[in-house]
Amino acid sequence: MKICVVGTGYVGLSNAMMLADQHQVIALDIDQRRVALLKNGISPIQDEYIEKYLKHVAHFEVTIDRAIAYKDRDFIIIATPTNYDEETNYFDTSSIEQVIKDLDTLQSKATIIIKSTIPVGFTQNIRIQYPNLNIVFSPEFLREGKALYDNLYPSRIVIGDRSETGRKVGELFQQAALKDDVAVLLMESTEAEAVKLFSNTYLAMRVAYFNELDTYCELRGLNSKDIIEAVGLDPRIGSHYNNPSFGYGGYCLPKDTKQLLANYQAVPQNLIGAIIQSNTTRKDFIAQQIIQLKPQVVGIYRLVMKQGSDNFRESAIQGIMKRIKAKGIDVIVYEPNLTEERFFNSEVVNDFSVFKQRADVIIANRAVNELSDVLDKVYTRDLFGEN
């Protein structure tokens, strides 16, 4: 098959690498730096599997030229970003709409697969606007830093189309996966859109739950780890996704929970809104714990949302940082992925030894061995050494 993937973030690039083992894949991106890196076999994102695959996939190329990318394709996968707009309470789907408009102008006969996260009802509406295009929605369930692995060994493949086209799209991803007997679920597009939002909101709820358990334990002087381990041994609960943090963050969970809440207009709910509020409350609590220590200088150890990722969009530790700075406390940042000298008007200290020496308190969402020599300075809620 001839396949185009639009967007080379985690979703787009992981799909491109997976499919390029069996098909001819071209990736399209407007970011010339990303395109230049990929042409040289260098991944613009941190993902162990993607970095390995880039070195040996035989049928992969990348371009900034839309005419070349879209020409004579069997499938076109849209994986462009959809940030949440706080003013409209809606995902910004303009990048998807532009791609679809271009394909309509070109009278494309390709099957268009939307992989970007979108509001419930978007696919149905866009199909009405462009009746001559063949548009399918298929959500992704990926972890940043493990995106290609999660594509190769998927928990399930969800296709928002019950027709023969949907079945073929399901086969495309099923045959590219390395995992045997992957469940392929065909459903209407609106149901597939809801699956994505409800899945991520459940994960956010689980993070919020164990964070609130941890808040209780810290204020009451209880051993949080002992309680979580015992709670998790109930098979109905499970010992996974239970490590306390400074809050849920990253590209997906914050925006997906807010979009789901926006979709609840005129629908009774308490829990969805509480999940979002819980995340704010947790960050307030963590910041207050730091402030009570009365440090002169607080060191922020890494801005990334988790280990094995280079993404710090919406990371919870940034929320803590802003709250501390609002109290007039000096904040310095150690983040190897930053090239700037300042981040949100705080000094970036690239010399790790100097960073450790200057900070009175070092806050780390995830504890690591390189902080072991200054444990008396470290504040973290990482109990299990896992993401």
Image (cartoon, grey):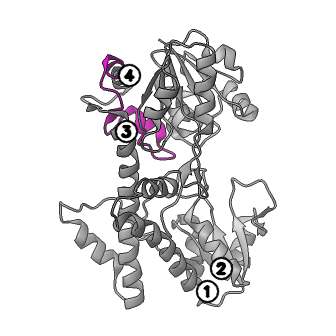
Q: Identify the residue at horizontal 74%, vertical 84% (top origin).
A: 328
Give the residue number, with chain letter if any, for mark 3.
Answer: 190
Q: Which residues are magenta?
A: 140-169
> Closer to us: mark 3 or mark 1?
3
Alpha carbon distance from label 4 to label 1: 52 Å
Alpha carbon distance from label 2 to label 1: 7 Å
Q: Secondary structure at mark 1?
A: helix
Give the residue number, with chain letter if any, for mark 4.
Answer: 169
Q: Check if mark 2's residue and mark 1's residue have beta carbons within 8 Å.
A: yes
Q: Check if mark 4's residue and mark 1's residue have beta carbons within 8 Å.
A: no
- Left/right placement of residue 274 relative to residue 341 reads left
Q: Check if mark 4's residue and mark 3's residue have beta carbons within 8 Å.
A: no
Give the residue number, with chain letter if any, for mark 2.
Answer: 324
Give the residue number, with chain letter if any, for mark 1.
Answer: 291
> Closer to us: mark 4 or mark 1?
4
Q: Nearer the viewer, residue 65 or 361?
A: 65
Task: Name the kind of residue labelled 2 in the image.
Answer: Ile
Q: Work out whether mark 2 precedes mark 3 in sequence or the reverse, and give the earlier one.
A: 3
Residue 208, compared with residue 36, is above or below; it is: below
Image x and y of residue 321, in percent: 65, 72
